[in-house]
Image (spheres, rainbow, N blue to C red):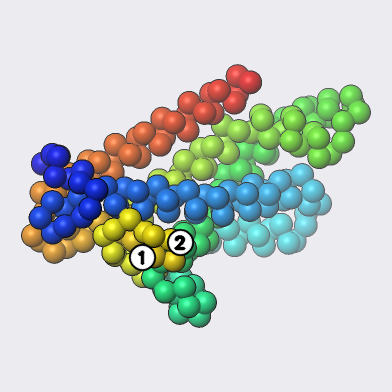
């Protein structure tokens, strides 16, 4: 059921094109990661490198992050609808969906980055300090490059959650099957597209085809991330 009709630029009820949904998925993943990755990595660096050992705030942050990881995605969706869609008046939009997903994946990135930084031997830091490097230089030149594979694994997990998310996006990004004109336009991702096709019951075969395309997209993202990790590690 993967045929030329699925790859038309514009979606109609006859061709059930996945192109708009695929483009929306890439845009959604890009914006969400752009928001969550710097905050998550920065927070993890503070917790591991700067916070004092035994700090109660650190314990609270860790427990909170672990708790947030286990919250169902529909709860994030309802929060996003109340805050971003209603309170901030962003309406159903790509931006509202991206901010909701960023909040959802932030604990995952934070915890995996923290574990990756903790796995870097202290001898690396001590050697850098012994050669006269400062704290900031040691972190960016020695610690972070050594922790890159672990950090990227967290980013891959987060990307997989973004690509496969439906509940949070139905309530925030909406279900419009077209390429957005701006960040405040509504749009559906591949996972939402697949869910809606299956739910309507009129295009179940196309829903299965969309699932295969979604799977290929996730495998491609994982392969690209692994390739980048290897390149950075060799450098």
Residue on which disc 2 sits: 183
| In the foreground, 19 or 136 | 19
**Pointer 2 local density, CA inside 10 Å: few below 14, some 14–19, many at least 20:** some
Is residue 91 visible in the rendered structure shown here?
Answer: yes
**Residue 162 image position (x, y, % from top left):** 41, 52
Rendered image quadrant of residue 5: top left
| Element carrying mark 2 | loop
Please give left or right for residue 225 compared with residue 231 in the image.
left
Is residue 50 depicted above or below 60 in this figure? above
Q: Residue at x 68, y 49 (%)?
A: 42
Is residue 170 depicted above or below 105 in this figure? below
Q: Residue at x 54, y 37 (%)?
A: 152
Residue on which disc 1 sits: 186
Q: Residue at x 33, y 39 (%)?
A: 217
The disc at residue 200 is none
Alpha-carbon distance for marks 2 and 1?
8 Å
The C terminus lies in which quarter of the figure? top right
Q: Residue at x 36, y 65 (%)?
A: 186
Please give left or right for residue 127 compared with residue 187 in the image.
right
| Element carrying mark 1 | loop
**Residue 94 image position (x, y, % from top left):** 42, 61
Is residue 110 visible in the rendered structure shown here?
Answer: no
Mark 2 in CB contact with mark 1 (< 8 angstroms):
no
**Residue 106 image position (x, y, % from top left):** 55, 55
**Pointer 1 local density, CA inside 10 Å: few below 14, some 14–19, many at least 20:** many
**Residue 205 image position (x, y, % from top left):** 10, 49
């Amino acid at each position: 059921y993967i045929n030329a009709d699925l790859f038309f630029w514009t979606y109609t009820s006859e061709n059930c094109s996945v192109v708009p949904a695929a483009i929306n998925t890439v845009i959604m993943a890009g914006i969400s990661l752009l928001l969550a990755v710097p905050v998550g990595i920065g927070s993890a660096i503070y917790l591991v490198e700067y916070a004092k050992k035994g700090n109660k705030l650190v314990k609270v942050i860790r427990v909170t992050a672990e708790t947030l990881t286990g919250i169902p995605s529909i709860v994030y969706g309802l929060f996003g609808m109340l805050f971003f869609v209603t309170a901030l008046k962003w309406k159903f939009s790509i931006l509202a969906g991206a901010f909701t997903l960023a909040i959802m994946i932030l604990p995952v990135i934070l915890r995996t980055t923290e574990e990756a930084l903790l796995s870097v031997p202290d001898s690396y830091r001590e050697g850098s300090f012994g050669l006269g490097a400062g704290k900031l230089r040691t972190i960016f030149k020695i610690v972070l490059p050594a922790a890159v594979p672990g950090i990227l694994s967290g980013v891959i997990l987060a990307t997989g959650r973004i690509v496969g998310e439906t509940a949070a996006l139905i309530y925030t990004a909406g279900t419009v099957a077209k390429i957005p004109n701006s960040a405040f336009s509504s749009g559906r991702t591949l996972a939402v597209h697949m869910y809606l096709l299956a739910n309507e019951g009129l295009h179940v075969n196309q829903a299965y085809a969309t699932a295969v395309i979604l799977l290929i997209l996730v495998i491609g993202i994982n392969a690209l991330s692994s390739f980048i990790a290897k390149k950075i590690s060799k450098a």
